[in-house]
Amino acid sequence: MIGRKALGKATALPQPIRDAYVWVNRNVGQLDPSDRAVPNFYVVGTQRGGTTSLFIYLLSHELVHGPRRAKGVHYFDTNYDKSLDWYVGNFPRVSTLLAQEKEHGVTPAVGEGAPYYLFSPFIPERIHAVNPNARILAVLREPLDRAISHHNHETKRGFETLGLEAAFEAEPSRLEGEVEKLSADPTYISLPHIHHAYLSRGQYAEQLQRYFDLFGSDNVLVLDSSQMSENPEAVVRKATDFLGLPPLTGVDYPLYNKREYDPVDPEIRERFGHVFDASNQALREMLPEGTLSWL
C-alpha cells in the first residue's frame, strides 16, 4: 500500500506517475483477493451520531484494521455494482491477520462503516450474505436532534436548499417511490433517500430490527451518541469488549465532524418531536434499560 505521506510527495511528480500512485493505492488489493480478509464488524450508523468518531477511535487499536482509504468502502450502497473481489481488495491480507493472532492470542478485528448502512432496508441482507457472523455496532442519537443536525449538514454540503421546517414537510414527497426503485435495481443510487430522509432516519426501531433478525441481538451493539460525547473512553471500552479485544489505552478522543448551528424554534421541536414516539417506545422494549440516555 502506498500511504498518504508517499502520495503527498508524489504530487510534485508528473501527472502520469501521480495517476499510477493513485491506481496502485486503490487497486493493489484486487491483485490477490483470495488472501484478503472479509470484515468481521460494521459500524452501521447513525448519520450525525458519531459513527466517524467511533471508527477512528477503534482504528487507534493495534488489533483493529479498516479499509485502506477511508472508514467506509460503500460497497453495499453506492458501489454495489462492483465485484466482491473489488470489495475485499480494500482490506488487509489474511496472512497478516493470522500473524497478529499468533502474536497476541486474539483475533484481530477488520471493519468498515457508513451511516447509510443502518437506514437502507436492503443493506443488512447484503452484509449478511458476505459475512453472516459479522458483529454490528450502531451509535444512536436523539432522533430530532439528529434530524436537525442532518439538515444543517446537508445544507452546508450543498445538497439542501430548503429551510428546516420546509425540508421536514417535503420529506414524504421527496422519498415517495424511492424504496421501490432501490428494490427494483440493486445498483440504483437514491439521492433523496441518502440526503433528505431527515425524520425517517430517526425511526431506529425498525432499522435495528432488521439487524437483530439477521445477526441476532447478541451480535448487535447499540451505543449512545451523547455518552460518547461525555465519556468516549467508556463507550470505546464497550466496543472493544464486544469485539473481543483488549482495552484501548493511551489515546485521545477528539470529536470528529462536529458542527455548530443556530438554535431551533421551539415550535418546530414541538411539532416534529412526536414523530418518533412509536419508534422510541419500541426501542424501550427492544433494548436493555439505560442503553440510550435520551429514551
Image (tube, rainbow, N blue to C red):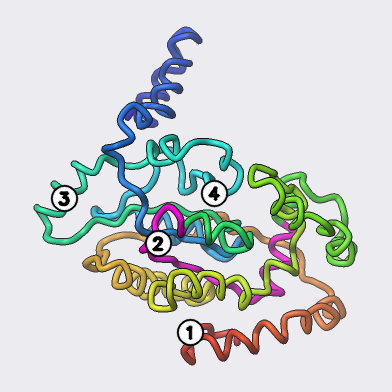
**Given this view, does label 1 or label 4 mark the residue nearer the observer?**
4
Numbered tag placed on residue 175 in the rendering: none
Name the spot of residue 212 as percent of width and height, x first.
49, 75
Is disc 3 surrounded by few (<14), some (14 to 19) or many (20+) residues within 10 Å? some
Precedes in sequence: disc 1 or disc 4: 4
**Mark 3 to mark 2: distance in Å?**
23 Å
The part of the chain drawn in magenta is: 128-152
**Residue 6's image quarter?**
top left
Whether residue 51 is situated above or below residue 3 in the rendered picture: below
- Disc nearest the viewer among 3 and 2: 2
Q: Residues within 10 Å of mark 4 (few under 14, many from 20)?
A: many
Amino acid under disc 3: Gln
Answer whether residue 148 is magenta in the image: yes
Picture disc at residue 291? 1
- Give the labeled residue for mark 2: 132
Crowd around label 1: few <14 · some 14–19 · many ≥20 (10 Å): some
Q: Earlier in the sequence, mark 1 or mark 3?
A: 3
Q: Give the mark count.
A: 4
Q: Position of residue 13 (x, y in %)?
A: 43, 10
Q: Is residue 9 left or right of residue 15?
A: left
Res. 35 visible in picture: yes
Q: Are marks 3 and 4 in contact (CB under 8 Å)?
A: no
Which mark is first along the chain, 4 or 2? 4
Q: Secondary structure at mark 2?
A: loop
Nearest to the observer: residue 122 or residue 173: 122
Q: What's the CA distance linking mark 2 and mark 1?
A: 25 Å
Residue marked by disc 4: 76
Q: Which mark is residue 100?
A: 3
